Amino acid sequence: MAGELHSRRYIVRGRVQGVGFRYFAQRAAIEAGVDGWVRNRADGTVEAHAQGSFDSLSRFAGRLWIGPRFAEVRGVDESESAPEACDGFRVRS
């Protein structure tokens, strides 16, 4: 079903902190039509949780692989996650 809600967790590896990646991810999520959040992790990766249709999550994941101008994405690990109560897409600290 196209309108069915799916939840995914993404861990983005590479040069992804200090390059505006979280705000890039927020814009990408809004454009793709997904809700959720994004945050930096202590190990230098960026974690995102997103919820939406299968197609919108695919668009969002594709943008994560690209990243902002000064990022160097070396990998995006994607897994299913439990749904969360989300209203929009937020940057977490």
Image (tube, rainbow, N blue to C red):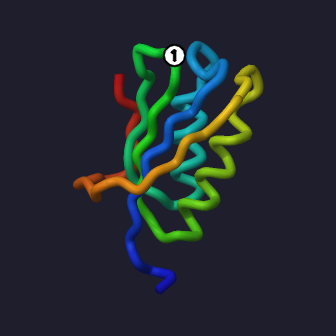
Instruction: Locate residue 85: give its quadrant.
Output: bottom left
User: Residue 78: x and y, percent?
Assistant: 52, 48
At horizontal 58% and vertical 13% (from top left) the residue drawn is 18
Other residues around mark 1 within 10 Å, as few (<14) / some (14–19) / many (≥20): some
Q: Is residue 67 left or right of residue 5?
A: right
Identify the residue at horizontal 38%, vertical 48% (top origin). 36
Which residue is denoted by mark 1 in the rendering? 44
> Under tag 1, what secondary structure?
loop
Q: Is residue 11 left or right of residue 86?
A: right
Q: Residue furthest left?
A: 85
Q: Residue furthest bottom?
A: 1
Closer-to-camera residue (3/47): 47
Please, what is the three-letter code of the amino acid marked with disc 1? Gly
- The spot of residue 83 in percent (x, y) is 28, 58
Q: Nearer the viewer, residue 19 or 1?
A: 1
Q: Nearer the viewer, residue 80 or 56?
A: 80
Residue 74, above or below 86: above
Q: x and y percent of residue 58 in the render?
A: 61, 61
Please give the name of the residue rendered at 57% of the width and 33% of the height, measured from the top-left corner. Answer: 12
Taking the spot 70% from the left edge, 29% from the top edge, the residue there is 74
Q: Give the quarter of the image for residue 14.
A: top right
- For the C terminus, give its image quadrant: top left
31 or 2, which lies in front?
2
**Residue lying farthest to the right in this orientation:** 69
